[in-house]
Image (tube, grey):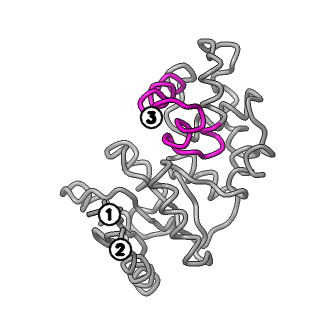
Amino acid sequence: MNRKIKIALADDEALFRRGIYFLLNREDDIEILFEAEDGEELITKLREGSIPDVIVMDIKMPNVNGVEATKIIRDEFPDIKIIALTSYNTKSFIANMIDVGAISYVMKNATPKELLNTIYEVDKKGYFYNEHVMKIIQENIIARHKKAKSRFDCDKLTKREIQVLKLICKQYSGNEIADKLCLSARTIEGHRNNLLRKTECKNMVGLIIYALKNDYVSIENLVD
């Protein structure tokens, strides 16, 4: 039996949340673990032991909003992947959610196909950003990380690590990078861990910021 992606849904709009539930529940390889009407209920259920692979979460919710919930989850449950699903498309909202730990950002007017594709990409690669979000990462988030470690004050990256970094920024999965470089997935994981250590980045967003800031990649390379 194939592994199912375990999903938690958090949104205070019950009708919308149920619509997403029925959309996702039709997929053979997706299992809805639970629903929550706000960040407080979401965190309570996580602490009770219901741990999903992916959370699809609204930003604006009562009691504990999506931004605050993401901060808490990143701290207590760092392996859970958070997809922000919202009607807010402003740069500040997107940059803020990415900054606190969301690994993808989907608008509520997206098509069902777009949402499903995002979930599958996030499950496979660990994160997924479309062209719009990638540009915001470049324009807004990098500006707020001026003190991020530069290529001149970090341990020198090897040629292979730079290759891996560039492919990570192009949103290839570990297995895809391994295939491209004719290496094992375990070796790629080692290079990824070295990159995180040398650059002092906490996650894939940090590596993207580092790569863009230090001209290892350009935004045009990432969205072509």
- Residue sitting at x 75%, y 51%: 223
Residue 224: image x %, image y %? Answer: 78, 52
Q: Which of 144 and 112 is in front in this view?
A: 112
Q: Position of residue 85 (x, y in %)?
A: 53, 67
Task: Please name whichever residue, 47 or 218, is drawn nearer the observer in this view of the structure.
Answer: 218
Q: Is residue 48 above or below residue 157?
A: below
Please tell me whether residue 168 belongs to the stretch shown in magenta. yes
Q: Which of these two is toward me, 108 or 193?
A: 193
Res. 169 image quadrant: top right
Badge 1 vs badge 2, beta-carbon distance below 8 Å: yes
Q: Is the magenta stretch mostly helix, strand or loop?
A: helix
Q: Name the residue under label 1.
A: 4
The residue to which callout 3 is attached is 185
Left or right of 25 on screen, residue 191:
right
Is residue 42 magenta-colored? no
Q: Give the range drawn in magenta.
A: 167-196
Of the residues shown, which amino acid type is indicated by label 3? Ala
